Amino acid sequence: MTPPEAEDSSGRFYAQIFIISFAALLLEISYTRLISFKLFYYYTYLIIGFALLGIGSGAIFVAILAPLRRIELRRLLAGGCLLGALAVAIGYTVIAIMPLNAFELTRSFTNITGSIDELAKLGLVCAALFATFLTIGVMIAALFSANPSLINRLYFADLAGAGLGCAVVVPLLGVFGPPSCIALAGAILALTGAQLAAGRQTGVLVASLATALALGVAVPYPQVLPHLVTDATKTIRPADTSRSFFSQWSPVFRIDVTRPPLDNDDAMRIIHHDGLWGSTLHRFNGDPASLTRFDTNERILPFRTIDPSPRRVLIIGAAGGHEILASLYFGAEKITAVELNPVTVSLLTTVFPDYSGHLHENPRVDIVNDEGRAFLARTQERYDLIFFVAPDSYSAMNAATAGAFVLSESYLYTAEMIASSLQHLSDDGIICMQFGEYVYDEKPNRTARYVGTAREAFRTLGIDDFARHVMVATSPSFMQVSTILLKRTPFSEEDVGRFMTNAEALEGTIARYAFGRELDDGSVNKIITMDEGALAAWHADQPYDVSPITDDAPFFWHFARFRTVLGELHRPLAIDTEDSVGERLLIVMVVISVLFATFFLILPFVVVRDVWSRLPFKGRTAVYFAALGVGFMFFEISLIQKLTLFLGYPTYTLTVTLMSILVFTGVGSLLTDLYAGQRNKALAGLFGALLVLTVFYQFGLGLVTEQFLASSLSVRVLITTAMLAPLGLCLGAFMPIGLATVAGLSDHSGEYVAWGWAVNGFFSVISSVLTTILSMSFGFQVVLSLGALVYGVGILAIRSVPSPD
């Protein structure tokens, strides 16, 4: 392949590839937040996959399309930046206005005709994402192919720009919001195009400046952009402002506050977390005596079960402050309310303080902006009541993942978290967890899993008589509300009596379990009372997986086993969003990823099939590049998920992990010159280092988390970067080594390098979703082990391929 003719040295374009990659990562991360609001959090993995697909396809297009190769490099970059900026504008418009319905999409397996529109619309969204990153991929590939001898330095500049994008995107999201950040990325591309076109391409220069101006206006004024049309299952419609009081993006999740449809006296307002009803804000006049509604509310149970009533209360997931009000009414003397999202905190402190009764000024109330588990690790306080009120608001870990509860990490519900909470109780203190259940008598999945996880937590603390330490009741509401009370010491007969009395006094409330009472023989009671051996067999026979969860596989809301989902794709969906919907969507995303990757990464080689057929060692090099794609994603995504516990904020975890891995992967690429001529020896050393790092991430990361979880966020970010730096240095060497190998095997080095990129991209795209499926099924430890194993297979495959040394 003849590289693009370059009037200038490739070294003159280090700044351009840095800026282009910066814009690409700003786009990628911003779209993960925007899609979390418009659709659901688990589409994040699809975005990562399609970013990889677009960039990988760019290399293929450069390799097989002769007209691209004949364009002078500066002209190609100028035009590419302009097209990229236009793709950002058009792509955002398509994604914003496209209506989707997650439930209809998953029905594609049972009613192809009825849901083909949904699949087509999702395909258009994917195409819009793909087109944006394709232009970026073409430019990066053209830069690489212009001077292969500088590929490691260009690769470093590429990854360094991406790393900087990760570093600044969180504060930018906090200031501007995702739509503005997407427009900013487009404007940066357009300005880069204008700089490259200056003095050479007047038309491109004018068009680039006009595009930059148009997109630049949208940065401070995002209202000029098309309104986002949210998924049909979401509870907020941004275009409908008639009932809206407040709306603001944050790096954690977007907050919208609206008036309920039937509430004419403004007694309550709905707080939407990333487009879903997450909690409520209630009018309060400042007098706790006016809150008599709590006498007939299930929130009475944790306060009236123990005597004396809890005086020191910790609320995890304070949201709109409803549990703060309950605590004030029931006489708590010190209330610590922890809330993750600073925007949610601001609702009580600065946005609606008059409406909510100035709770932040009440001397009995301390509102803390923090992640619940990190706060517990930091405090030495003991509490009479630790109140978990479905603290993720159906978002599994926090509302940053609103709607993605099935597929998200849920570290607030693991056995380790329950054990930590028990250790922060006073001598007679209790934990209260409240969930909504669709139909408790038929499918109490949330309650059953939490109770089973609590039993495991008690076991790890050496407490074997769990049945004496738990009580359960359900109450009528929009959904049945399940109340679970846990106590480190056994509940006394007096505690049980008060619990039963209060439950009976609440209309519709049913006491489900209390020690010494014959109440029912449902699955929750079986989990509480069965011996260990029988319980394990019972779990294996259940239609839903309600087994305990730990930090290694913290997917609390994942109840449908994948083998069951695959065997029942023909079955119509239930209304329950936890019943196979998320799992089916993952399968849909795998199918879409395979189709797009095949079409754009593999089929293009039909155009150059004569050249491709003459490339030597295709099988072994394909195994190598496939292994790099799979292994890299296994490490990257499982560590993003695993480090969510340590960093607390999913968006922070995504950006810090990507930044660390990308920057140090670039450095690792740059250092490959040091062991040029020693390929196999270098690969053996790198694999040995990878094995050591894998063992550390499996067993040492938990110790680091335990030791430093109480540290400030800035300290945890620095520690995370230090932990990931060696991995980046290691992984960054494999791709340049492989590309250098295949480039020296044939006179068609460009086509061979493109083939390596294609295979790597194909398996990276698929693995971006596959990693989540494996993590949910087997845990992070297994996925990390598989990542190391896959790298080993790739190294074995390429060892017998002639080295260019």
Image (cartoon, rainbow, N blue to C red):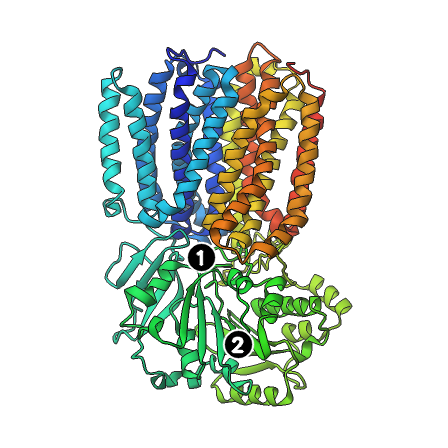
In the image, which disc is placed on residue 562? none
The residue beneath circle 2 is 385
In the rendered view of the protein, which quadrant contains the C terminus?
top right
The residue tagged with tag 2: helix, strand or loop?
Answer: strand
Evaluate if marks 1 and 2 touch, with contact meaning CB atoms under 8 Å apart.
no
**In this rendering, position of residue 262 left or right of residue 113:** left
Give the image location of residue 54, x and y in percent: 45, 31
Within-10-Å neighbours for mark 2: few <14, some 14–19, many 20+: many
Among numbered discs 1 and 2, the one appearing first in the sequence? 2
Q: How many labels does the image show?
A: 2
Q: Nearer the viewer, mark 1 or mark 2?
A: 2
Q: In this view, does 164 lie above or below 334?
A: above
Q: Which of 234 and 730 is in front in this view?
A: 730
**In this rendering, position of residue 67 left or right of residue 564:** left
Image point (52%, 15%), residue name:
149
Farthest residue in the right direction? 533
In terms of image quadrants, where is residue 73? top left
**In this rendering, position of residue 303 left or right of residue 462:** left
The residue beneath circle 1 is 402
Give the image location of residue 266, x and y in percent: 27, 73
The residue tagged with tag 1: helix, strand or loop?
Answer: loop
Note whether residue 207 is visible: yes
Note whether residue 120 is visible: no
Q: Which amino acid does label 2 sit on?
A: Leu
Q: Which amino acid does label 1 sit on?
A: Ala
Q: Nearer the viewer, residue 487 or 225?
A: 487
